[in-house]
């Protein structure tokens, strides 16, 4: 953490909805004239798509049914921490892109499922914004979370998370329900050991809870909408949070604990705008003071 080069990270598992949250932050950055450097967590996977497929085949042949993108073996945790540390020091760092599909790959003349070459971050950004699986990861040798100035967890209840992943992977990637279910099961040890612990390190957690029946996520035909959900917002440190103001702006909201707001799911974007805009103002004020401008 440094005042001159703040880092904001959104962390959540596959299917959690971190991409939608990223769009809210894009709106805030655009409105507040903040030049943010965006980093996708997928770009710090260790293997490209073909390599990961091969590595999984080897793992299965060796009796390992748990290799996943959630764990350290398939990710460059050390390089991610190096980026965060370097950015905090001088606003630089090495980044690349993971090309998910033909549209993303076309400008680079590469096949989808590959990485672009490593390159230096463009200079002059006001903040680094990370969105992905491991913005708050910590192991025995790596601690990414300690470099983050504002760490936000996006954590649907587990059945909703699975429904979102199943529906996304079936509609956008052509997978069968059985294939997605197999992926969920394979990832479970890494989910427990490397994803869940991050949400105890976050500054704010957003957890969406459906108010419709999601008891069997593997047969669900639709994803519960925001209006069919409630939102649980937990602050690690409630000091300085203007709860009366938030409750007055987020109609039909209440507090379940001294650090927790409950509000309608349809208020998610508004809640994020209200909560994070002042936090970003404070980061930018601190940055200007540190720079003497």
Image: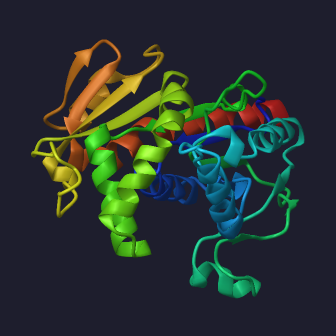
Question: Across the whole image, how many numbered discs are drawn on residues?
Answer: 0
Residue 186 image offset from top left, x and y in percent: 48, 46
Residue 184 image offset from top left, x and y in percent: 41, 48
Residue 247 sits in quarter: top left
For the N terminus, the image quarter is top right
Horizontally, is 170 left or right of 82 in the view?
Answer: left
Q: Can residue 16 be seen from the camera position used here? A: no
Horizontally, is 131 left or right of 184 in the view?
Answer: right
Its colouring scheme is rainbow
Name the residue at 71% across, 71% down. 114
Residue 261 image offset from top left, x and y in percent: 28, 26
Q: Is residue 236 above or below residue 160?
A: above
Q: Can residue 232 be seen from the camera position used here? A: yes
Q: Is residue 99 above or below residue 165?
A: below
Along the line of sight, the residue nearer the viewer: 120 or 243: 120
Along the line of sight, the residue nearer the viewer: 125 or 135: 135
Along the line of sight, the residue nearer the viewer: 64 or 185: 64
Residue 198 sits in quarter: top right
Residue 61 image offset from top left, x and y in percent: 62, 53
Name the residue at 68% across, 39% down. 72
For the C terminus, the image quarter is top right
Name the residue at 81% across, 44% down. 79
Horizontally, is 220 left or right of 290 in the view?
Answer: left
């Amino acid at each position: 953490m440094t005042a001159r080069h703040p880092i904001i990270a959104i962390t959540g598992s596959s299917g959690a909805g971190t991409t939608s949250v990223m769009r809210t932050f894009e709106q805030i950055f655009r409105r507040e004239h903040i030049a943010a450097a965006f980093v996708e967590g997928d770009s710090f996977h260790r293997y490209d798509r073909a390599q990961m497929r091969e590595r999984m085949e080897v793992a299965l042949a060796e009796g390992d049914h748990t290799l996943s993108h959630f764990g350290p073996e398939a990710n460059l945790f050390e390089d991610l921490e190096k980026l965060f540390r370097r950015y905090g020091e001088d606003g630089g760092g090495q980044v690349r892109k993971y090309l998910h599909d033909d549209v993303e790959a076309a400008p680079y003349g590469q096949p989808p499922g590959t990485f672009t070459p490593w390159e230096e971050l463009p200079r002059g950004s006001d903040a680094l914004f990370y969105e992905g699986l491991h913005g708050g990861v910590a192991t025995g040798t790596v601690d990414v979370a300690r470099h983050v100035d504002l760490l936000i967890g996006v954590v649907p209840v587990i059945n909703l998370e699975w429904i979102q992943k199943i529906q996304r992977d079936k509609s956008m990637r052509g997978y069968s329900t059985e294939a997605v279910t197999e992926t969920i099961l394979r990832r479970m040890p890494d989910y427990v050991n490397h994803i869940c612990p991050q949400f105890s390190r976050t500054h704010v957690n957003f957890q969406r809870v459906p108010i419709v029946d999601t008891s069997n996520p593997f047969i669900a035909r639709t994803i519960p909408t925001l209006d069919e959900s409630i939102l649980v917002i937990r602050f690690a440190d409630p000091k300085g949070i203007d709860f009366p103001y938030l409750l007055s702006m987020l109609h039909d909201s209440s507090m379940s604990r001294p650090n927790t707001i409950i509000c309608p799911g349809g208020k998610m974007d508004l809640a994020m705008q209200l909560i994070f805009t002042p936090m970003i103002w404070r980061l930018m004020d601190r940055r200007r003071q540190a720079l003497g401008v």
